[in-house]
Amino acid sequence: MAVLWDKSLVPWHDASNAPYTGAKAYFFDVGTTTPQITYTDAALSIPHDHPVVALANGWFPPVFLPDQSSHRLRILDGDDNTLWDVDNISVPTTTPPEIPDSETPTEQLFQTGDLKIRWSTTAPTGWVRVNGRTIGSAASGASERANADCEDLFLFLWNNDSSLAVSGGRGGTATGGRERARVPCREVRVAASSSHATSGSTPSSSARKRSASVTKASRWSRQSTPRGPVAS
């Protein structure tokens, strides 16, 4: 693959704004004065003369270089005065990065209960607003989100926040059949679910009917099993 030299087709002017007519660009192997081949076409099939001479308007013609190569560049004006002499210049690659064969490690994904900040009035998929309202199953009547996908966040909050307020009383386990649970107020939003609950009391299916109150703010809480980075 080829890369167009970034000084090609660019006007070169001196301090008085006169074009560098007849300027010369020498391309060498790194650390040497051994000429390096440059090309007039992207197929790298037609070599340039060495040096490459600027046009009358001070523009160098198209100069193509092999990608991922390196060179030394020396530029002289029409009177052979050195304008530039720079070594170890790397040509960027045109090869796209390889896509990993394996899945993204779980630890690099958002997890239930993670927070993120986002300027928006609606929650991205898989997230709920931390806005003082409630979450729970469809049967819970939750005011923020009433859906079974909120169960993991409810369980996460139950097992990790001993001060979690539950309507009708928290009780000793998450299986008490409470209608709603209130999440402490945060000026944020958090992720709401995970593939498994954290250690602690084992909740029953009735927990799916409960809801947790989420506080008002610009942050989100993750609510479901990690599915990779969530678009903002």
Image: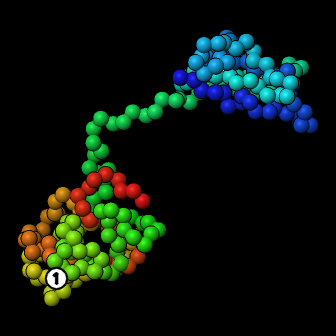
Q: Is residue 42 visible?
A: yes
Relative to the observer, which residue lies in front, 11 or 75? 11
Label 1 sits on residue? 179
> Is 21 positioned to the left or the right of 135 in the image?
right
Left or right: where does residue 210 sit relative to residue 81?
left
Q: Up-down: is 77 above or below 108?
A: above
Please count the marks in the image.
Answer: 1
Q: Nearer the viewer, residue 199 or 165?
A: 165
Residue at position x 64%, y 22% in the image: 64
How was this image coloured? rainbow
Residue in the image at 16% along x and 82% along y = 179
119 on left or right of 110: right
- Quarter of the image holding residue 153? bottom left
Among the 4 quarters of the image, the one containing residue 196? bottom left
Residue 82 visible? The answer is: no
Quick one: label 1, few (<14), some, or many (20+) residues within 10 Å? many
- Name the amino acid type tagged 1: Glu
Res. 186 image quadrant: bottom left
Q: Position of residue 12 (x, y in %)?
A: 81, 32
Q: Nearer the viewer, residue 159 or 155?
A: 155
Nearest to the observer: residue 88 or residue 37: 37
* The C terminus lies in quadrant: bottom left
Say which residue appears at 76% left-offset and 33% top-offset: 10
SS assignment at label 1: loop
Q: Position of residue 112 (x, y in %)?
A: 26, 62
Residue 34 percent across, percent down from the top left: 67, 11
Q: Residue furthest bottom?
A: 168
**Is residue 51 positioned above or below 8 on the image?**
above
Residue shown at 28% from the left, 46% from the top: 105
Residue 202 % position (x, y): 8, 69
